[in-house]
């Protein structure tokens, strides 16, 4: 696929997701509140990201001690 088509489609999808998430409560009611779900996923992703980066640094440090 052309790189410009990929970039454009990626931007369209990201913008669509942001718009749907921002206006989800107004459009779909409280049952489909995507903002709360997205915030929970983001908080969990940050936690696991920091955890695995720390684990990576620990394993790299231990690997350097061996060699």
Image (spheres, rainbow, N blue to C red):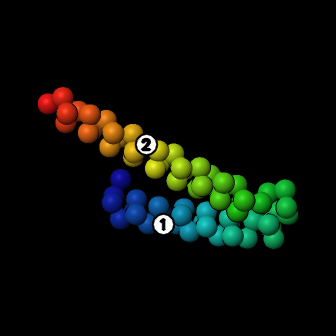
Quarter location, residue 66: top left
Quarter location, residue 61: top left
Q: Is residue 39 left or right of residue 31?
A: left
Disc number placed over residue 52 in the picture, else none: 2
Q: Residue at x 59, y 49 (%)?
A: 44
How packed is label 2: few (under 14 Cα within 10 Å), some, or many (20 or more)? Answer: few
Which residue has dot 1 on it?
11
Q: Is residue 15 left or right of residue 40?
A: left
Q: State which mark lies toward you, 2 or 1.
A: 2
Question: Residue 32: percent from the left, percent from the top?
Answer: 79, 57
Q: Nearer the viewer, residue 9 or 27?
A: 27
Q: Residue at x 60, y 55 (%)?
A: 43
Question: Residue 24: percent from the left, percent from the top?
Answer: 75, 65
Q: Nearer the viewer, residue 1 or 48?
A: 48
Q: Is residue 22 left or right of residue 11?
A: right
Dot 1 falls on a residue whose secondary structure is helix
Q: Is residue 31 left or right of residue 3?
A: right
Question: Residue 8: percent from the left, percent from the top?
Answer: 44, 66
**Distance between the alpha carbons at the discs numbered 2 and 1:** 28 Å
């Amino acid at each position: 696929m052309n790189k410009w088509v990929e970039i454009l489609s990626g931007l369209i999808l990201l913008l669509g997701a942001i718009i749907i998430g921002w206006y989800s409560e107004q459009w779909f009611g409280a049952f489909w509140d995507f903002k709360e779900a997205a915030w929970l996923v983001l908080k969990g992703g940050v936690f696991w990201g920091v955890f695995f980066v720390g684990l990576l640094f620990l394993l790299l440090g231990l690997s350097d001690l061996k060699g």
